[in-house]
Amino acid sequence: MNLTALPNFSDHSEDTFKLILDAAEQIATNSLYPIFREMDRQEPQLIDGLIRIHPGMKSIIQKFGQDGWVNAIFPYDEGGQQLPWTIHMAAGFIFQAANYSASVFPFLTTGAANLIRTFGSEQLKENYLPKMYSGNWQGTMALTEPDAGSSLSDLSTTAFPTDQPGVFKIRGQKIYISAGDHDACENIIHLMLARISGAPSGTKGISLFVVPKIRLDGKPNDVLTQGIYHKMGYKGAPIAHLMMGSQDDCEGYLVGEENLGLKYMFQMMNEARLGVGMNAVAIATAAFHASLTYAKERPQGRKANEKDLQKPQIPIIEHADVKRMLLVQKCITEGSLALLIYCGILSDKIAQESDKELKLKQETLLDFLTPIAKSYPSEMGVISTSHAVQVLGGAGYTTDFPVEQYFRESRIHPIHEGTTGIHGLDLLGRKVWMEDGLGWKLWLNEIQEGIGEAKRWSELIDLSTSFEKQLTTFIEASGQMFEKRKLGAEILLADASLFLEACGIVSIAWMWVKQAITAQEKLQNGTQETHFYLGKIEAFRYFISYELPKLTGIIQRFYASDFPTLTMEKEWF
């Protein structure tokens, strides 16, 4: 897909995209990575009601604002660079691989600002966007409460009307708020969900508000930082517990219409879900390359058939099992990255598509892919970084090498922006059935087309045929799973996470088909990057030979008629 063929991006070119990614690499190398370990070792601290973070973050956040990263994807007439989201995601991948904690600050602001610019009044835009874009003010997404995590219908933060139109008094608390308070910005702007007093119960009564820490007149807004959470990883970015309205003086400003808050917030949440997938890939990729470098340099042992102990030891990368662990990482990271870039391109196309029928297809396919593109990289990113630790052996378990930090930081992503279980319920409970199963059908059609294209290459036909057979088995088993809908939602959804896992494996196999086709074309036409493309072909072979067969065990459950996860009583544990 040539992004510059889309009207909004016609001013860009491959060269400008390369310049942008080169600039991202410079920031990552010179600013983010140098404090990667320091931010982990010097955790944020709550001191006198204010969270203090690494002192280097202030200049970094300012640079992101000054260089236009916060509003880069927004239109020219709003001061943005009209950059494709795909390229923005790719730049984010570079930042996140260098220092995940440091990377979250500006892009949280991007998401919050996007909600204001899309749904907010002109006054809200005028009052808040310029300083958010400049990096002076931090943006957050404030959803979670002590008794309302994934179940947002149960949130209790309340908004009380005042005599000023659009102005409400907010009372409640929010927990686990990323960048919810810190000393690197002048103000924190929370995009907060609350229920207007008297509004309907459940999700239909939720509204969205701008709740600043400090009001425009400089007066504190009765938003207190009650506490800070101490995490196993991702330590450099503070996660705050906020109290609003302790003195009955917290003002919130309505965004859009009353009771449509969750609908608005889903714009940011869906973007964030793909962002979480990309975060996971970035961290796993950094771990992969750290373990790859180590494996090339660390001598140990000899080939299994070498009995002469006088011969020098070989680098561990020459051992088959080490190659296996590196191939697992390569397959997970590069396959997941391809899937997320594919989703980014879909998103960019949707934003400019004028054909209603085609746009519906693109939107439905992206909706179907989102829980997969969030969850597979997140879950398998943990596995991948674990393999990175294993490659280093005892060294990997020490703080002297970075892979233990990557391992700790990777674990948040199966939790962030909806747990894997929630996304399994979303995929099997909703996305499969939307538009009469259109997303499911489009996904399978895309995969089958990719297999058909790969089978035209003699070098790929055996692997493609093997994938085709596995896909047929998966489709048949899924049909059996879908039949359980007749038995009720509890039975259908009991193994929703397994269905999500299976769809993830199939999706990454599809991405490796697409990469193998490109690699074969490059090799046939002649390239100076022969090793790179041969590596792609061999990784495709590994995934089809080692990872895809794992489907067999998973889809056996699709035929099952026993449900121990339902029949198990809590007392029996």
Image (cartoon, rainbow, N blue to C red):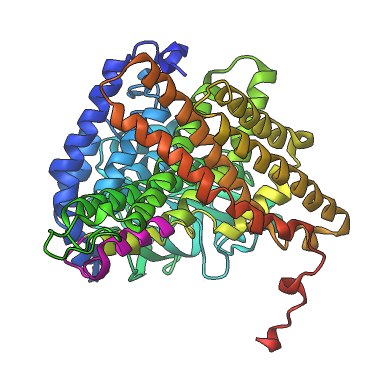
Viewer-proximal residue, 78 or 491?
A: 491
Quarter of the rendering containing residue 465: top right
Horizontal and vertical percent position of residue 491:
79, 62
Looking at the rendered image, the quarter that the C terminus falls into is bottom right
Quarter of the rendering containing residue 154: bottom right
Viewer-proximal residue, 296 or 36?
A: 296
Residue 284 sits above or below residue 274 on the image:
below
In the image: residue 60, left or right of residue 15: left
Residue 389 magenta-highlighted: yes
Tell me the residue at 74%/74% (across/down): 564
Horizontal and vertical percent position of residue 485:
83, 53
Viewer-proximal residue, 63 or 124?
A: 63
Quarter of the rendering containing residue 422: bottom right
In the image: residue 539, left or right of residue 98: right
Tell me the residue at 24%/34% (across/down): 24
Horizontal and vertical percent position of residue 306:
24, 60
Report whether residue 217 is seen.
no
Residue 302 magenta-highlighted: no
Viewer-proximal residue, 465 or 97?
A: 465
How many marks the image carries: the answer is 0
Toward the bottom, the furthest residue is 571
Toward the front, the furthest residue is 308
Horizontal and vertical percent position of residue 5:
45, 11
Tell me the residue at 25%/36% (across/down): 134
Helix, strand or loop for the magenta stretch, by majority: helix
In the image: residue 521, left or right of residue 507: left
Residue 349 sits above or below residue 314 on the image:
above
Report whether residue 480 is seen.
yes
Q: Which residues are magenta?
A: 382-401
In the image: residue 279, left or right of residue 22: right
